[in-house]
Every structure is written in C-alpha cells, then in structure tokens.
Image (spheres, rainbow, N blue to C red):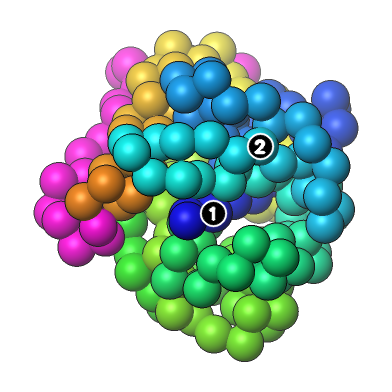
Amino acid sequence: MFLVAGLGNPGEQYAATPHNLGFLVVDRLAARHGIRVTRKECQALVGQGTVRGKTVLLAKPQTFMNLSGVAVRPLLEKYEVPPAGLIAVYDELDLPWGAMRIRPKGSAAGHNGAKDLIAKLGTQEFPRIRLGVHPGHPLTSQGRTGADYLLSRFTRQQNETLDAFIDLAADAAESIIAEGVELSMTRFNGRVETVAPGAAKEE
C-alpha cells in the first residue's frame, strides 16, 4: 500500500492558495480514480482505492501545515505502510512556479510541513513531490513575506496554468506508485508548466 499525503491547511480561506497545492493534487487523484477523501481518521481526511493497480490511501492532514506529521505518522502505523511507501506532496517556495522536483529522500529544505514529517517519522527516507510556487520576483520588493504570499490566493496568471500543473503532479504521483521513484525522477524532473509572459507580476 502507498500513502499519498498532500500537505496543506484546512479551511475555505486557504483552499485556493499556493500552500495548499498538496491538497489540490490529492483531490485530482481522487477525482481520477473515484476515491472519496471524506473519512476522518488520525486527524486527516482519507480515502482508499486503487491507482495503477496498487492499493493507495489518499490523505489530507487537517492539523495545519506545521503539524502535518501528527496526522501522517498514525496513518502510516495504522495501515502498516513503511516511510518508503509515503509520497508527500507539497509546495516549494525555492522553486519557480510550475517547476516540479521528485526526490526519494532528503532534508526539509526549510518547508515546515516536511520538517514536521521528518521530526515525527524520525527519518528523511520517504519520497516527496515538491511543487514550485515562487512567483518569479522578490517578495520583499512588495513588502511581503513568504508566509504572506503562500497564504494569498492564486493570481489570475497562475490560475491559467494551475490545472495543468496539478495534472502534472498527479501524473508524477501515479508514476511513482506504478514505476518507482527513480524512473519517475527521470520522466518528470525538469518539466515545467510555465505561466504566460508577465505572469510573475502580482495583481
């Protein structure tokens, strides 16, 4: 069994923000494979089904981003999934909007949700799909912090490629499940869903 955990924040006010890309990817996988992610378990919304012939548990932790591990660790233990069977999907401010990086393991690289996963699981040895959300210009030039930006709604320009970006990430998750991390890295790393010219400008 695999556990695909999309990281994000619960609540309608956060639904259409860069910090919730993980939730959106889980929703896309659920829609593709007829999985209802509505059951409440271990402080998460979960749903179980089949993806590319493999049993998969989809999860959206409801603990808020900084405590993602509080939900994910009990789910792994309950369903007897090893850390290597976890696929964590989350936003990455260090990557440009539309970029994606699959990694088999590694540090949190400053991401608080990943940091809590590592702390609660006691290991960095789990695959992750990092989704680039940086807008392409210095946030400080507008007097904004990274947190301000991550919790702000998608811009009109970002919305133009959001659907394709989510599709690409869902494809990557399916590839990891069916073909493994290494082959998926070869297939997907370096691919970018680019925004239209001028999309880096805030509205």
Residue 37, image quadrant? top right
Going from the N terminus, do you reach mark 2 or mark 1 first? Answer: 1
Is 163 on the left-hand or right-hand side of 3? left
State the image coordinates of residue 71 (x, y, percent, origin top left).
77, 61
Is 176 on the left-hand or right-hand side of 82? left
- Disc 2 residue type? Gly
State the image coordinates of residue 28 (x, y, percent, origin top left).
51, 25
Q: Which residue in the protein does label 2 denote? A: 47
Question: Of 18 and 41, which appears nearest the observer?
Answer: 41
- Disc 1 residue type? Leu
Whether residue 100 is visible, yes or no, is no
Question: Of 87 and 154, which appears nearest the observer?
Answer: 87
Is residue 83 one of those drawn in magenta?
no
| Residue drawn at x 79%, y 36% as measured from the top left | 39
The residue most toward the bottom is: 122
| Callout 1: SS | strand
Residue 94, image quadrant? bottom left
* First to last magenta residue range: 180-203
State the image coordinates of residue 135 (x, y, percent, origin top left).
48, 37
Q: Which residue in the protein does label 1 denote? A: 3
| Callout 2: SS | strand
| Residue drawn at x 76%, y 40% as measured from the top left | 45
